Image: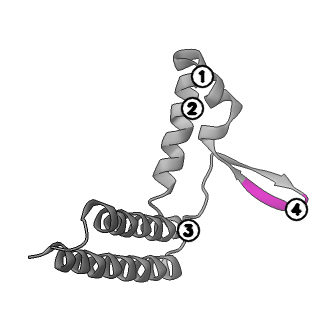
Amino acid sequence: MSNTELKQRLYRICVAILVAGLAGALLIYRTAADQPESGVGFVIIDGVSYPIDPQSSRRYLRGLEEFGGKGAVLIDQFSRWFEALWHGKKLGITVGCLSVLVALAIFLFANYALPDGD
């Protein structure tokens, strides 16, 4: 198989990944429902109740910082952010971004790593 044929095959794979990934991401985004917020209590502001997240309370953050320092607080916040990417509508956005990145990586590999011609 020549480099030109291999490049064409990689381009087709790139388009297939992009189309399938974006279609799946759109399907996930349209059908997924975000998780209802739960908390240890509620605070009422102007007649609207908002849940209090136990991991964002001052007591929790103070205790976490006492035992692990500022690094533990940052790692905890990053961990909760990363975990949130895999639920609800954010999962559709994550799948779409990953499919674009994988397709771009394959395209760049085919375009720059493989020389033209035989």
Q: Residue at x 26, y 78 (%)?
A: 13
Check disc 3 and report the residue beneath it: 34
Check disc 1 and report the residue beneath it: 70
Q: Residue at x 57, y 29 (%)?
A: 73
Work out whether residue 38 or residue 24 is closer to the camera in this orientation and state it. 24
Q: Secondary structure at mark 2?
A: helix
Residue type, mark 3 in image: Asp
Q: Residue at x 35, y 81 (%)?
A: 15
Q: How many marks?
A: 4
Question: Can you tell which quarter of the image residue 45 is in?
Answer: bottom right
Name the front one of labels 3 and 1: 1
Q: Main secondary structure of the magenta part?
A: strand
Q: Which mark is residue 74?
A: 2
Q: Residue at x 12, y 75 (%)?
A: 2
Label 4 crowd (10 A; few <14 / some 14-19 / many >=20): few
Residue type, mark 4 in image: Gly
Q: CA distance from mark 3 to mark 1?
A: 30 Å
Check disc 4 and report the residue beneath it: 47
Counting from the top left corner in percent of width and height, residue 5 is at: 18, 80
Residue type, mark 2 in image: Leu
Question: Can you tell which quarter of the image residue 11 is in?
Answer: bottom left
Residue type, mark 1 in image: Lys
Name the front one of labels 2 and 4: 2
Report the residue that reaches farthest toward the right: 46
Specify the segment rendered in magenta.
46-50
Name the front one of labels 1 and 4: 1
